[in-house]
Amino acid sequence: MSKLYTNKRKPKREGKKITVGAVEAVPHGRGATVKLKDGTEVALFNVKGAFYAIENFCPHKGYPLADSRIYGTEVECDLHGWRFDVRTGECFTKKDCSLDSYEVVIEDGMIKILV
């Protein structure tokens, strides 16, 4: 069994709402890497106008999920095909490999993530 990737760029939960950009910046069916000031990252996804954020790196080998393909509400890691629910971070490929998800709110046309 291979060792899983440890995400060292996972945001710490601080209860802060961070503005990350305008709604128009992330088209439907696409993901975007959001780099926070402290160097941590989340993957932000637009699914038919609803926005979701999860950890950016696949626990299998650390590939950035924001760069991977989206199928409905699932993102599939382009490296080895692991699949995750963008709404919850649940891993469909392997038990006990789910990712943290982060609340996303839209205020005045701006995307904000609660970390």
Image (cartoon, rainbow, N blue to C red):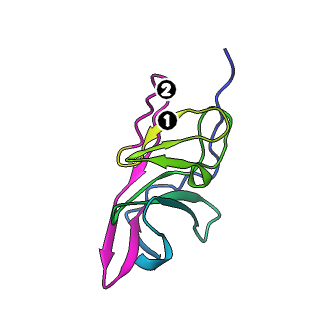
Residue drawn 31% across and 69% down?
105
What's the CA distance linking mark 2 and mark 1? 6 Å
- Which of disc 1 and disc 2 is earlier in sequence? 1
The percent position of residue 15, horizontal first and vertical second, equals 37, 63
Q: Which is nearer the eye, 58 or 15? A: 58
Q: Specify the label residue 93 is tagged with.
A: 2
Three-letter amino acid code of the residue under disc 2: Thr
Q: Is residue 47 above or below residue 86?
A: below
The percent position of residue 86, horizontal first and vertical second, equals 41, 48
Which residue lies under the disc numbered 1?
Answer: 83
The percent position of residue 58, horizontal first and vertical second, equals 59, 40
User: Is residue 101 highlighted in magenta?
Assistant: yes
Three-letter amino acid code of the residue under disc 1: Arg
Q: Which is nearer the eye, 1 or 40? A: 1
Quarter that holds the N terminus: top right
- Under tag 1, what secondary structure? strand
User: Is residue 35 highlighted in magenta?
Assistant: no
Q: Would you say the residues marked 2 and 1 are in contact, meaning their CB atoms lie under 8 Å apart? A: yes
Q: Please provide the residue range marked out in magenta.
A: 89-115
